[in-house]
Amino acid sequence: MNKQNPVVELKLPVIPDIELSATKTAEVISRHMNLSEEKTGEISMAIIESCINAFEHSKTKEIFIHFIISADKLTIKVKDQGVGFDKSKVEIPNIENKLNSDERKRGWGLQLVSALMDTVEYDSDETGTTVTMTKKREDNE
């Protein structure tokens, strides 16, 4: 018999700080998986960034977050039904220009998520965007 991986699903409306409920869920799942505090923090920050990107850019009314628990990793999917985007057209900010100007100190979300998670994939078109992120569980955890 093939045991299915447990899945936790959240549906979040666009209201201030609602992404924090997703980080609480991630903390519970991380404890269940015996992930380190460092990995748990990285997962939470990646979720916050992904939710904020969806809220600010997709023009959606709600987002869906799926946590898929498996023996060797946690997969998180953040989905919206918004306008979509072309990742190749997203400009990577120049850190020196940002720090030495009055320009908004924003725009690093995609790079930050990629740095925090083991894998990140974007699937986006005019019907919405799905960000699929994974964090591997190490053998010694």
Image (tube, rainbow, N blue to C red):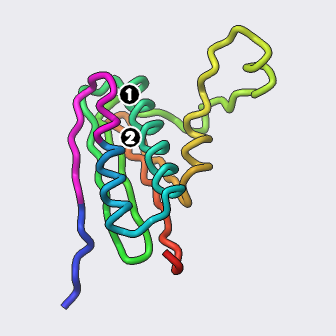
Q: Position of residue 64 (x, y in %)?
A: 26, 43
Residue at 21 percent of width and 41 percent of height = 11
Residue at the bottom extreme of this rendering: 1
Asked if the magenta segment contains residue 19, the reply would be: yes
Of label 1 and label 2, which has the lower sequence position? 1
Q: Position of residue 60 (x, y in %)?
A: 29, 27
Residue at 33 percent of width and 27 percent of height = 17
Separation of disc 1 and disc 2 at Cα?
Answer: 8 Å
The amino acid pointed to by label 1 is: Ser
Judge whether 60 appears above or below 64 on screen: above
Tag on residue 129?
Answer: 2
Secondary structure, mark 1, is: loop
Q: Place residue 47 in its image quadrant.
A: top left
Secondary structure, mark 2, is: strand
Residue at 52 percent of width and 80 percent of height = 139
Q: Which residues are magenta?
A: 8-21
Q: Position of residue 85 (x, y in %)?
A: 47, 33
Question: Contact (CB < 8 A) between labels 1 and 2?
Answer: yes
Asked if the magenta segment contains residue 84, the reply would be: no
In the picture provided, is 9 more to the left or to the right than 94? left
**Disc 1: which residue:** 58
Please state the total of marks drawn on the protein image.
2
